[in-house]
């Protein structure tokens, strides 16, 4: 079951869900709008190797915004830091932005019960598009979860602040 705005607010008052900073105007009937921070990261490598730490350059999104180009993946973060216990948070793109050809993630919008941190987004576009810091970029939806659900405890991304590049290479650290 998806939590309604009223249920989200109840879980917030109980300390099970937190969104910082919180703005009641961003609370929708069954989701909460998250906004884009002021930074992006981009890799200029021709080939990314999943066994190696990726190399990204940071960009600041100024007042005039920044134009994203097709064929590139841009890492971004939500301005909001979220905490979720007793629910499963999932990010969805804003339909208005998808109608302009902007995707906020390829497959990584699923969170875990117990996740806390800023959300790293993987932005891509089908044609050049200008984006701006502070704009509504996605929405978080909370799904109810059964009682004895284990809390997320991975050190890979838990407690992340700002943009966190892929740490998939760590999956290969114990190979011979």
Image (spheres, rainbow, N blue to C red):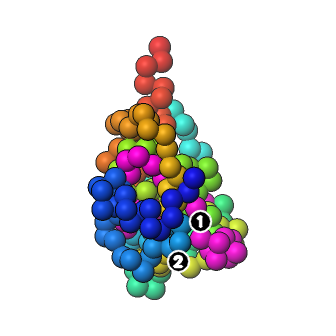
Q: Main secondary structure of the magenta part?
A: strand
Give the residues drawn in magenta, as a range: 72-101
Q: Is residue 46 magenta?
A: no
Disc 2: CA contacts within 10 A as few (<14), some (14-19) or many (>=20): some
- Residue at horizontal 43 percent and vertical 24 percent from the top: 173
The percent position of residue 116, horizontal first and vertical second, equals: 35, 50
On the image, numbered disc 2 is attached to which residue? 131
The percent position of residue 60, horizontal first and vertical second, equals: 39, 71
- Residue at horizontal 65 percent and vertical 72 percent from the top: 95
**In this view, 13 is above or below 28:** above
Q: Nearer the viewer, residue 155 or 85?
A: 85
Q: Nearer the viewer, residue 12 or 49?
A: 12
* Side of 106 where 176 appears, left or right: left
Mark 1 and mark 2 residues within 8 Å of each other at the beta carbon: no
Disc 1 to disc 2, how far (Cα)? 14 Å
Label 1: which secondary element: strand
Q: Nearer the viewer, residue 103 or 83?
A: 83
Q: Judge depth for marks 1 and 2 and give the one in front.
A: 1
| Number of numbered discs on residues | 2
Toward the top, the furthest residue is 176
**In this view, 119 is above or below 158:** below
The percent position of residue 172, horizontal first and vertical second, equals: 48, 26
Label 2: which secondary element: strand
- Residue at horizontal 68 percent and vertical 76 percent from the top: 100
On the image, numbered disc 1 is attached to which residue? 93
Q: In this view of the protein, can residue 78 be seen by the observer?
A: no
Toward the bottom, the furthest residue is 64
Disc 1: CA contacts within 10 A as few (<14), some (14-19) or many (>=20): some
**In this view, 2 is above or below 52:** below
- Residue at horizontal 37 percent and vertical 47 percent from the top: 85
Q: Which mark is residue 104?
A: none
Q: Considering only order in the chain, which callout, 2 or 1, is on the residue closer to the N terminus?
A: 1
């Amino acid at each position: 079951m998806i939590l309604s705005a009223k249920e989200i607010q109840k879980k917030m008052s109980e300390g099970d869900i937190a969104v910082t900073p919180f703005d009641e105007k961003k609370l929708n009937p069954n989701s909460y709008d998250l906004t884009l921070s002021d930074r992006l990261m981009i890799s200029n490598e021709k080939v990314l190797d999943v066994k190696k730490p990726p190399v990204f350059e940071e960009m600041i999104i100024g007042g005039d915004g920044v134009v994203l180009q097709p064929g590139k993946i841009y890492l971004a973060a939500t301005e909001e830091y979220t905490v979720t216990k007793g629910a499963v948070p999932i990010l969805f793109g804003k339909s208005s932005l998808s109608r302009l050809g902007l995707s906020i993630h390829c497959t990584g919008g699923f969170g875990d019960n117990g996740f806390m941190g800023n959300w790293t987004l993987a932005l891509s576009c089908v044609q050049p598009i200008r984006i701006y810091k502070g704009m509504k970029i996605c929405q978080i939806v909370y799904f109810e979860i059964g009682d004895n659900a284990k809390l997320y405890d991975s050190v890979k991304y838990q407690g992340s602040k700002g943009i966190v590049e892929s740490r998939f290479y760590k999956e290969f650290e114990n190979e011979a």
